Amino acid sequence: MGEGVTAFAEGDHVVTSFISMCGKCRYCSRGRPVLCDNANKAFYQLPDGSVRTHDAADNPLNVFMACGVMAEYATLHVDNVVKIDKDVPLDKAALVSCGVMTGVGAVFNTAEVEPGSTAAVFGVGGVGLNTVQGCAIAGAEKSSRST
Ligand SMILES: [Zn+2]
């Protein structure tokens, strides 16, 4: 645990978020963290502008979207970590960090799919399948109209 980190404790179960959410800017305070003013800072560095991951020769390694979670270990900023219930299996929770967040998030935060809407999803990999799932949760329906 990093110095000054109080929101988490050793042993907490967490998922990572590739969208940095400061929780303080105008968008975060309005419940639109996907538009966080500070998120762009975290494309290749941690949200505070630091790079804390280094190679064996101590050269800085920039990590994509402040996570770089394809590695065995990662150094994450608190703005990119979300605490979850310890009863949630981590292998299932890991899916939420990427495919579910992107697919379901696109339905609710980007497309704003409404009940009764018809949506087309191109590609049904990890993200696409969760987009279909998000559409179902949002109440999208298969169109009965033919063209
Ligand atoms: Zn923010």
Image: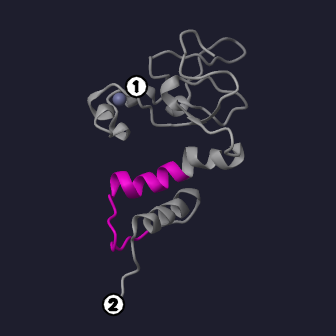
Q: Quadrant of the C terminus?
A: bottom left
Q: Measured along the vertical axis of the image, is residue 90 above or below residue 36?
A: below
Residue that extends furthest to the top in the rendered view of this protein: 3
The reply to whether the magenta stretch includes residue 87 is: no
Name which quarter of the figure residue 106 lies in.
bottom left
Q: CA distance from mark 1 to mark 2?
A: 46 Å
Q: Quadrant of ligand 1?
A: top left
Q: Which mark is residue 8?
A: none
Name the kind of residue labelled 1 in the image: Lys
Q: Mark 2 highlights which residue?
A: 146
Q: Residues within 10 Å of mark 2 (few under 14, many from 20)?
A: few
N-term-proximal mark, 1 vs 2: 1
Q: Is residue 49 left or right of residue 51?
A: left
Identify which residue is drawn at 59% across, 21% down: 61
The reply to whether the magenta stretch includes residue 112 is: yes
Q: Mark 1 highlights which residue?
A: 41
Name which quarter of the figure residue 57 lies in.
top right
Identify which residue is drawn at 60% across, 32% down: 68
Q: Measured along the vertical axis of the image, is residue 135 above or below residue 36?
A: below
Could you say whether the residue bearing mark 1 is in a helix, strand or loop?
Answer: helix
Could you say whether the residue bearing mark 2 is in a helix, strand or loop?
Answer: loop
Q: Is residue 106 left or right of residue 90?
A: left
Identify which residue is drawn at 34% across, 63% down: 113
Q: Quadrant of the N terminus?
A: top right
The magenta segment is: 100-121
Q: Are marks 1 and 2 in contact (CB under 8 Å)?
A: no
